Amino acid sequence: MTGLARRIDPSSDRNSGSGAHKKQKGAKNNKTFSGKSKVKPLSEAYLPTKQDILTFITENPDRAAKRDIAKAFNLKGDARIYLKDILRELADDGQVEKRAKRLSRPNSLPPIAALTITGRDSDGGLVGRPIEWSGDTAAPLVLLRRTNKDKGPTVGVGDQILAKIFANSDKGGLPYTGRVIKKLEKRDNAILGVIRQLQSGEYRLEPVNRKQTEVSIAAEFLNGAEAGDLVEVIPHQKSRFGLPQGKVEQVIGSIGSEKALSMIAIHEYEIPHIFPEKAIEQAENAKPADFSLSGSHREDWRSLPLVTIDPADAKDYDDAVFAEADTDPANPGGFVIVVAIADVSYYVQHGSALDHEAQKRGNSVYFPDRVVPMLPERISNDLCSLREGVDRPAMAVRIIIGADGRKRSHSFHRIMMRSVARLAYQQAQAAIDGALDEKTERVIDISLKPLWSAYAALKKARDKREPLELDLPEKKLILDDQGQVLKVIVPDRLDAHKLIEEFMIQANVAAAEVLEAKNQPLIYRIHDVPSLAKQESLRDFLKTLEISLARGAELRPGQFNGILSRVKGTDHEELVNQVVLRSQSQAEYNTENIGHFGLNLRHYAHFTSPIRRYADLIVHRALIRALNLGPDGLSNDEVGELPAIALNISQTERRAMLAERETTDRLIAHHLAEQVGNEFQARVQGVTKAGLFVTLATYGADGFIPISTLGREYYHYDEAGHSVAGERSGKGYRLGDSVEVRLVEAQPVAGALRFEMLTEPRLLPASLQSHHKATKFSRKTGKSRTGGPAKGKPSHISRKSKR
């Protein structure tokens, strides 16, 4: 190397790093990475820097052998010795690793990888994730690209594929793109279900997914499973006659009690529920934050009378609030409000096992009988929980509002706090209403009354802003100690709930605004306007009620609120609320800001729940970085990964929603299994061409009525009118109708209920009598010219509609 060093000028521009690399790439007759560059004398040789080599390996994973690198940079003779030494140094530093004969970056994908297609991006493109991943970070996402010349297989969400992987040069997108090579067969077609033993002694698998057929299992293939166990079965033999044969691959657990029903959703949606040993070890070894050791960026706010207000059964408390009148004479009638949020980033740092698992989970999942937390309980329920009378690190935002409730300024602080009281919503509301207890009596004047006064001001601004105000009460299952359903309730919507909600919204807005002002990349919570197709469908429906929705003008939540106020107190109130809800887009996480339509806000990011949402943890780190509040802010690597992280947590959020909903269905179906034949009051909550979805008034359970069982005549589906009408009579049912039904069948494992309609159809408005185009209906005779009964559709049980 000494001889080589003497012949190469270290001060030359050709040796100056990545800039030189780019210059050479555009030089004539010297195409970098082509392997065809013109050989130069050694005195003119370009020696790539470490960064040049790392860039090449990242951008060319399929051509990253030592020979390829030497050819790309036109390295000959002694220069290859230089390359060998550089590669050895990079390997020793852990910046490259060898896979087969190629070099690769740690936590990177190989040039060919097996992927599972997990969803779509905001433009509708398919996105995949590697089936096997051993990296220290969350598995990267791959955007699958397709051109008109591609003749590869047609694939969709849920398919497994083999793909050619490319590094994505678009820094604002996902880290990789891919091209489909072939479609793979899914792993052995494993079927999730419950073992049942027939009276004959034979064993059957009752699948969780009702679209799958039952499987017969011979006793020698039970693998230790017993009747009532939730298992995975691999079909191993098919027959033209009879059921397919299978063998038990894995026993997941007993399904003998209702408390085990949530395990079906956990396994069906592959929700991570067991923490890796490294994550548990990190959590158990974490030390409580001490103010004297927490760094110079921490401010002491322990004398501020912050309180937590949460559900009575909450175990983690990640937000505390405070308010007081502003003493600034320039702001008469104004308030200072403080929202303090658990400083999860202090304990969960980027690249750690805890962080990797939190990003993988994306969020906590709340089932009626259990919680699958994003973080281990040592972190979520202990160290990060803002417990009463205990010192806790927090991220706090101090907001100044005027008498009109509008925000005047805000500032973020990293603090040490001590909650003076842990209160339940009902407890805080009762105190404001005059029913004090020992705890609320201590804080009524210093905490609660100022909070309610500040909320009264905030409510003025909220009413003026006019966010979307849907009136759709949420039902809650009450379970006993064995996990059995006792009752279903609709909790009262208290001012205490609205107060905390509005304080959190203000904190989220402030977080988004300060990060934008600092030009700090972040993940927004966005909510798009309803699509044009959904707007048109809503207009068609509203016409049936003689309500108009204007075209052309930019749609605002206030227009929906006007419609909802018109039907308030009428028979159509719940119906219109449901239809307006279904016209809305789905909220998601994104690095591109389009605002939040439902809240009518231009800047919005989730900041207030980092214990249970990874999006909030990212925003905390972004604030720490942007405001220089400590060394544990957002890293450069994370900034580049934000689009992928946003897509991942949007998908985990939707996964959690489906899993929670289906578990509720299963719990209620299990509870009602012994009430087959009973009659119930219900409401039509969904109308499809296959039948009606109804919700029981008492239990909130959802079930299905096949259209073929509604009557002897043929029923036509009117999508715009959300109704079905008889071909001959013009009578039928529509969304929102109150009806009486009889339970015909209950399938607890599938969470499916089938009902029979008992209420006679009613004559629908002429605009809702949807008929076959070949049928002429006479209102005078009540008969169709074609006449005759039509054949119905086969009866079946259907899973609850994914609305």
Image (cartoon, rainbow, N blue to C red):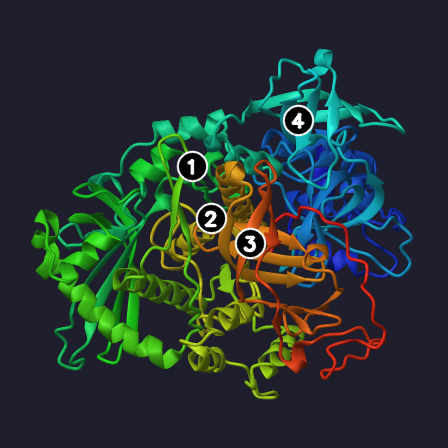
The quadrant where residue 349 appears:
top left
The residue beneath circle 2 is: 614
Single out the mark in the foreground, 3 or 4: 3
- Distance between mark 4 and mark 2 Cα atoms: 31 Å
Whether the residues at callouts 1 and 4 have beta carbons within 8 Å, the answer is no
**Residue appearing at x 62%, y 80% in the figure:** 765
Q: Secondary structure at mark 2?
A: helix
First in sequence, mark 3 or 1: give its number.
Answer: 1
Tell whether 12 sits left or right of 26. left
Q: Secondary structure at mark 1?
A: loop
**Residue appearing at x 14%, y 64% in the figure:** 449
Identify which amino acid the numbered label 3 is placed on.
Val
Identify which amino acid the numbered label 4 is placed on.
Glu
Position of the C terminus, as image quadrant, is bottom right
Identify which amino acid the numbered label 1 is placed on.
Arg
Quick check: 784 above or below 183? below
Identify which amino acid the numbered label 2 is placed on.
Tyr
